[in-house]
Amino acid sequence: MKKFLRTLLLPLAVLAGLPVAGFAQDNPAEIRLGISSAGVGGKPKTGSTYLANVHLRGLLENEFAKDGIKIVWYFFPAAGPATNEAFSNKKIDFGHHGDLPMIVGRSTGLKHKIILVISRFGPLYFVVPAASQAKTLADLKGKTISNFKGTNQQLFLARLLRRNGLTEKDFRIISQDGYASRTSLATGDIDGTITTPWSLESRGVAKRLIELRDDKFITTPSTLWVGEEFEKKYPHIVQRLVNVFVKAAQWSSEEENRETQYKLWAQSGNAYEDYKHDWEGSNLKVRHSPLIDDYYINITKKAVAESLEFKLIRRDVTVDDWIEPKYLTTALKELGLENYWTPLDKDGNPVR
């Protein structure tokens, strides 16, 4: 019957100059999300973001259950490059990325649209073995440092080294993911890496050489994007998904939910105490803000410039035409949250 009505109405819509979508909104059978991270041992759970809260609280599943739409989450221990590969192979519709792999994907022709900011201003620690005599990064010149190449951590390290008057050429750089690098620290196979230090320090195998808190230009925001094909075909689904994420961002921004989040995130296999230390003193509303503000736009453009400078991409990427803000704007208005988060200027300062 629905097919018959659609056949009947289609010529009328064409004659009237009306969009066919106005008569029927098709739904996808499933919504597939690629997450550039995984828990301990590849566990399909993560922490530290309101996106993790969406997953761990089953919010998308609750929203789309009445439509019979399946929610599929893919967690990639190989991080951003694996998310790019999955999208290139049409395995996912949405992706959560750090800056570098997202930029690399865009530069190679992957077509997606930025729709939400997921996180910003997290801490950064440069960690060395407990027995290390190093007092500064310069003391490690010529030694072995691990870094997860192809991920946003590669830009984190490049920025940190530049701030200290150094480059990658001053060290022997090997590529390891976060869990492998912590093992290498414990066995003394590397002389330093960027990683969370708390569990290592509690075991007496490593210590912090550098700790930066909520730095505005070392650790940069992560992003949620949607594939252009999916977005054009199912804009109503994208809007509903964004609404769910924005509501989760508000819940995550409330101080009364701080401890609950730490406990949720610990399901990833990373310790509750690690999250508690990492987030101690942080403003939840700042770090969980979904706003695509001037700071986000500026820092993303800077990341593109750095990627070109460090020869991590071969083609320039324009940012302004990459962003699709209408879903966030609509969600904030519909949920009465237009003034809930404070936008930041290009330097990361509140604008009101």
Image: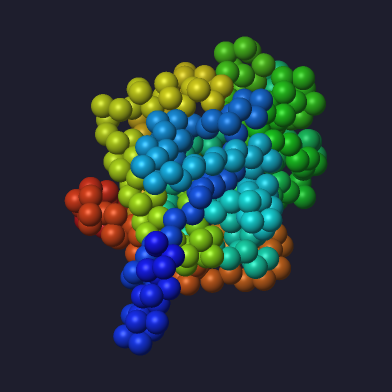
Residue at 27% x, 48% y: name it: 341
In this picture, residue 311 sits left or right of residue 163: right
Residue at 76% x, 46% y: name it: 170
Q: Quadrant of the C terminus?
A: bottom left
Q: Quadrant of the N terminus?
A: bottom left
Residue at 39% x, 46% y: name it: 67
Residue 101, visible in the rendered structure = no
Which image quadrant is residue 49 in? top left
x, y percentage for residue 133?
70, 24
In this picture, residue 352 sits left or right of residue 85: left
Which image quadrant is residue 307 in? bottom right
- Decide: is 86 above or below 112: above
Residue at 42% x, 51% y: name it: 117
- Decide: is 131 above or below 216: above
- Decide: is 91 above or below 139: below
Which image quadrant is residue 256 in? top left
x, y percentage for residue 169?
77, 50
Query: Nearest the camera: 141 or 79?
Result: 79
x, y percentage for residue 168?
73, 48
